[in-house]
Amino acid sequence: MDDIVVTAPQDKIESILCKFNAYYERIKFIVEYDDKNGISFLDVRLIIEERKLIFYIFKKAYQF
């Protein structure tokens, strides 16, 4: 499984998902919703603030 993040207007999400899933029958996309302010994707937290996309990078603390 691979992860893809796409930003789109809320009212277009279902039509985009249908188009993606119609492309190739063995690949199925799903939509996951996080909270209203953002979504976690890999080691990044994506947040939309004042119509701007903000990236917060998560770094694990190293233990020696």
Image (cartoon, rainbow, N blue to C red):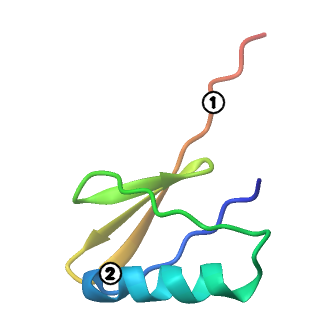
User: How many other residues sit within 10 Å of disc 2, few (<14), some (14-19) or many (≥20)?
Assistant: few
49 w.r.t. 11: above or below: above
Q: Position of residue 58 (x, y in %)?
A: 55, 43
Q: Where, quadrant-wise, is the C terminus in this rendering?
A: top right
Q: Position of residue 30 (x, y in %)?
A: 54, 63
53 w.r.t. 64: above or below: below
| Observer-nearest of 28 and 44 | 28
Q: Residue at x 42, y 88 (%)?
A: 15
User: How many other residues sit within 10 Å of disc 1, few (<14), some (14-19) or many (≥20)?
Assistant: few
**In the structure shown, which secondary structural element does the residue marked by tag 1 occupy?**
loop
Please state which amino acid type lies under the numbered disc 2. Answer: Lys
Instruction: Tell me the number on the disc at residue 19.
Output: none
Q: Position of residue 50 (x, y in %)?
A: 20, 79
Q: Position of residue 6 (x, y in %)?
A: 52, 77
Please indicate whether residue 35 sits to the left or right of residue 55 in the image: left
Please indicate whether residue 1 sits to the left or right of residue 30 in the image: right
Nearest to N terminus: mark 1 or mark 2: 2
Instruction: Tell me the number on the disc at residue 52.
Output: 2
- Circle 1 sits on which residue? 60
Rendering quarter of residue 10: bottom left
Please state which amino acid type lies under the numbered disc 1. Answer: Lys
Q: Residue at x 77, y 53 (%)?
A: 1
